[in-house]
Amino acid sequence: MQTVYFDNSATTALCPAARAAMLSVMDEIWGNPSSRHTMGTAAHAVLKRAREQVLSSLGIRGGKDENLIFTASGTEADNLAITGTAHAKRALAGGKIITSDSEHPAVLRTVEALEAEGFRAAYIPTKHGVFDMEQFRREMTRDTFLVTVMLVNNETGAVNDIRAISDYAKSVNPDCIVHTDAVQGYLKIPFTPTSLGADLVTVSAHKIHGPKGVGALYVSPYMCKRRAVSPIIFGGGQEGGFRSGTENLPGIAGFGAAAAEGAASMDADIAHMTALRDRLPAMLAEESALSGIAVNVPQSEARAPHIVSLRMPKIKSETMLNFLSGKGIAVSSGSACSAQSGRISSALLCFGLSEAEADTTLRISLCADNTEEELTALCDALKTGIKMLARMKR
């Protein structure tokens, strides 16, 4: 049975360019990038090339090595950005952090850990996918040293206006650091760190057809000059002293290749995914058997091109997910990072859904390789599933 894959927000298939880059490094360039001999020099060249490729994909030309820190995941990059900023100066102890209530757990749990250390935090509401700017303005004070808000919500596709958030934050406190978890927006939403007004930007390889186990944190020249991020992993001082540990060279090479390929095709990919995203609700409306499915449409000014949140007609998402999986169709009931907990999605509750509604929601997440024929297969399977599962409930 051939799988129709609509869970690209969880992870993506490895692209040929990334695979080739990784195999080349594993077969031919297995030296340590920190070593001074020939093999080490060759490995360092691969590392430098990949760093340039990822920086270029972020619109950064001529950036220094210290402007991009390779990590083991987007989660680690978020932790480094948030905890590293909080710990950079002892004078920040007890200061304030502002985030949103619907962030990825990598951000929410990190902020909560800092609260336990004595830092204060404010969680801005995002009902219907709209960041509450009025509440943010009320919470933004001179002692707010960090604002961390995601670019794209990984469950609803809502897009936050990071530029507006940054501009206001820095008007109140010019020294406030702005971080955005851009993992779901990377190569899906055109941006540069400068266009966002962000000092720190988190990205990840496996969301753009690169390998798992590799993330990166962009650090602005201003932040590097101030050494405004403290390391959270200590050791040999790799990655400019920001992140110790021998670099995962095959993974990083794959990341660089995927970033270069994704940047080259980004405009066409966005147009294709947007067309599919907009076509799916129309296909659902064309079928009377699917009329009970509702689309959780964000009311934010912008929407990501690759995420559609669907609410099933009184059928639990896990039940429908398992049915679709049996038909060879892969979807998600929410964030893969929190799905194992079995809890109702907090992001969907913050969006404004009831627990019952959140418990019947599926996430369809697209990539440039998906087709309209695959959407038809999804709709056909949903029709069969609704009919069968509804009958079983009687």
Image (cartoon, rainbow, N blue to C red):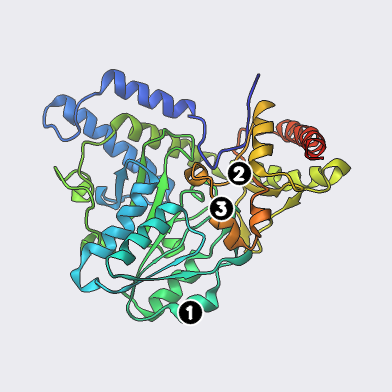
Q: Secondary structure at mark 3?
A: loop
Labels 1 and 2: the sequence-earlier one: 1
Labels 3 and 2: the sequence-earlier one: 2
- The residue carrying mark 2 is 333
Labels 3 and 1: the sequence-earlier one: 1
Amino acid found under the numbered disc labelled 2: Ser
Amino acid found under the numbered disc labelled 1: Arg
Q: Position of residue 391 (x, y in %)?
A: 82, 36
Badge 1: residue crowd in 10 Å (few <14, some 14–19, many ≥20): some
Instruction: Note whether 198 is above or below 58 in the view shown.
Output: below
Amino acid found under the numbered disc labelled 3: Ser
- In terms of image quadrants, where is residue 327? top right
Front-most of residues 79 and 205:
79
- The residue carrying mark 1 is 137
Q: Residue at x 22, y 53 (%)?
A: 231
Looking at the rendering, in which quadrant would you find the N terminus?
A: top right
